[in-house]
Image: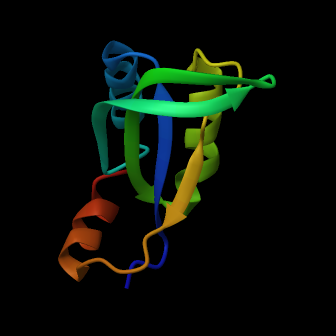
Amino acid sequence: MGKGFIIIMTSVDSKKEAERMAKLIMEKRLAGCTKVTGPVKSYYTWKGKPHISREWICIIKTKNSKYKKIEEELKKTHKYELPEIISFNIGMASTEYLAWLGSSMI
């Protein structure tokens, strides 16, 4: 039911940066919807040391075929040395929602 659509997630260090990335993706019509949520507290190990950071999450809903272009845009504009760019297949979604999502991007 959700075949052909994915959710891409990335995290950034500020609300302003998350909103900038969301606007970039949407202006290029690479996604049908991008949500910004946060702040969240991230616990991770970086270069062998534990860290705790406050971050914002961009949740990007798009077609499988848009992944590489979105990955390129995120890598090109992201402030992190190694940005989180992960995707999940949308397993199930309403037919109407997927029709809208698909029609919302080029």
- Left or right position of 95 against 2: left
- Point 62% across, 33% down: residue: 44
Type of colouring = rainbow
Vertical position of residue 3 compared to residue 76: above or below: below
Residue lying furthest right = 48
Q: From the viewer's perspective, is 15 left or right of 78?
A: left
Give the total of numbered labels: 0
Res 25 → quadrant: top left
Image quadrant of residue 18?
top left
- Estimate the x, y position of residue 26 in percent, counting from the top left: 34, 36
Residue at 42% x, 25% y is: 55
| Rendered-image quadrant of the N terminus | bottom left
Camera-side residue: 67 or 59?
A: 59
Depth check, front residue: 80 or 23: 80
- x, y percent for residue 102: 34, 63
Whole-percent x, y for residue 22 in the image: 35, 31
Give me the residue at 43% from left, 71% from top. 90
- Give the residue drawn at x 31%, y 19%: 15
Q: In the image, 85: left or right of 14?
A: right
| Res. 30 image quadrant | top left
Residue sitting at the far bottom: 1
Say whether residue 73 is visible.
Answer: no
Residue 17 in sight in this render: yes
Residue closest to the far front: 50
Where is 25 relative to 15, above or below?
A: below
